[in-house]
Image (tube, rainbow, N blue to C red):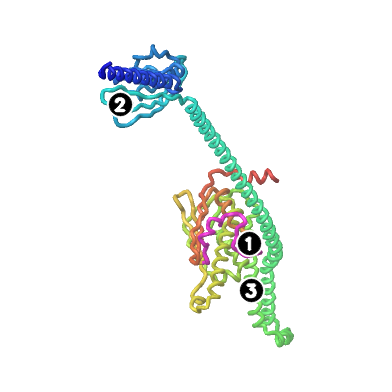
Amino acid sequence: MSDSNTHDELNTQIQYRLIEKLSESERCYRELIENLNEIVFKFDHQGCLTFLNPAWTRTLGYSVNASLGQPLADFIDPQQQAAWQVLLTDLDQRSPLKQELKFRHICGQVVWLEVAIQPRKMGSEFSGSLMDVTDRHQAEQLLQRMNAELEKRVEQCTRDLDTTNQKLRATIDNLQQIQCQLMQSEKMSGLVNLVAGVAHEINNPVNFIYGNLDYLEDYLQTLLEIVDCDQAHDPSSATAVELLMEDVDLDFLKEDSQKIINSIRTGTSQIRQIVVDLRNFSQIDESELKMINIHEDIDGILKILNYQLKAKIKSISIEKNYGELPLIECYPRYLNQALMSILENAIDATDAWRRKTAADPQPVDRQSYRGKIDIQTAVLERQWITISITDNGIGIPLPIQNQVFNPFFTTKVVGQGLGMGLAISHQVITGKHQGKLTFRSQGGQGTTFTIQIPIRQADPAESKVEDSVRSLS
């Protein structure tokens, strides 16, 4: 055998071996592709399928032979075909693509597949895989639904909790108002009874004295006239009269008796005025709506405070700048109590500042300060009146200003206040009279309380708080 024949035979054997290896590799590759759970596919530049492995049938139920040559878009859910077309136009040779799309099983149910497409070489087909992610997608959707449901339940629970909190706050506010009203009723009842009792006890003897002063004056005048007449027309009695006049200074008696009568008259007039002020303030029979002159009530309250707080008020200058006000419709008993509480606070504030400046080591400060309260009234927008009470007292510190109208909040020492005065005043003005009570203040620079109430009450019925109080009684 020649060398050439030997070389050809060797080449032939090598080729056979290579063919066998290639066939074995192809067989292994096909077995691998056919046994994959993922779908392996190829499609041309028009989107038509050119290769599919058996996983296509296992996953979607369609025959491989029947599916080849068909556009892949035909197996995608109609709602996502537009998205697939967008993906096709974006395919290039530079980057792989991965996207989850919704396919339709041959039986009609939805199957979610993750599409992974590799970039192609020039002129070649597209190749890629489809991995079933339906379970994961359904789990994600279930989780989203559960989260959405949970959020709805949390929102509903939050709304229910807010509603409950609002009801609870309303109940607490209502209870506080009822408590304020009960405290006010008790306080007013005790004050009215005290004032009425004092007025009654003073009024009887004063009326007796006052009513008899005229008679006393007439009697004394008549007696003096008789003495004068006797001196002038009865000479026989002159000796006896002269003897009496030696021990009595008749001229002094005439003059002094008139002074005594005038003093008694002045004193009883003052007592009678005190009684009138007490009766006006207590408004014993006027717990319902009534037309009043608010200026007269303020003047009466100032007189009562002058009797009660003479030591404090004597060092305070009170200025009244009254506007032209019509008669207003209100509950006099309650409004007077509210005004009195605000004025008492103004007096206490100026007295506290006076005592603080008195303790100041600088003598100029001790001499320069004098308490001052300014009361102004005016008509506001024709249907309201406004009352401003301004003091130059110690002021209200900013950190506690939002607590001023809270029941039982007080800056006074134990025993000097319950913290109900301003809370009750706020309830009386805003609740019972449909008005407004505001203030502005700065520590060390005084405070201004502003009251606004309508000239006529829109609803004369009792307030809800009073109804609640009645239901408890």
Alpha-carbon span between mark 1 and mark 3? 39 Å
Q: Is residue 417 visible?
A: yes
Q: Residue at x 45, y 52 (%)?
A: 380
Residue wearing tag 1: 417
Most common secondary structure along the magenta stretch: loop
Q: Is residue 151 magenta?
A: no
406 in relation to 123, above or below: below
User: Pointer 3: residues within 10 angstroms few (<14), some, or many (20+)?
Assistant: few
Q: Is residue 73 visible?
A: no
Q: Does dot 3 land on a helix, a strand or a loop?
A: helix
Residue 453 in the image: state x and y as whole percent. 52, 51
Q: Where, by quadrant of the figure, is residue 229 drawn? A: bottom right
Residue situated furthest top in the rendering: 66
Mark 1 secondary-structure assignment: loop
Residue position for label 3: 263
Which amino acid type corresponds to the residue marked 1 in the rendered image? Answer: Gly
Stretch in magenta: 393-417
Q: Are marks 1 and 2 in contact (CB under 8 Å)?
A: no
Pointer 2: what residue?
120
181 in relation to 66, above or below: below
Q: CA distance from mark 1 to mark 2?
A: 91 Å
| Quarter occupied by residue 47 | top left
Badge 3 amino acid: Ser
Residue appearing at x 54%, y 59% in the figure: 400
Give the image location of residue 461, x and y in percent: 59, 43
Asked if residue 411 lies in the magenta stretch, the reply is yes
Left or right placement of residue 188 versus residue 390 in this view? right
Type of residue at label 2? Arg
Q: Position of residue 337 (x, y in %)?
A: 60, 57
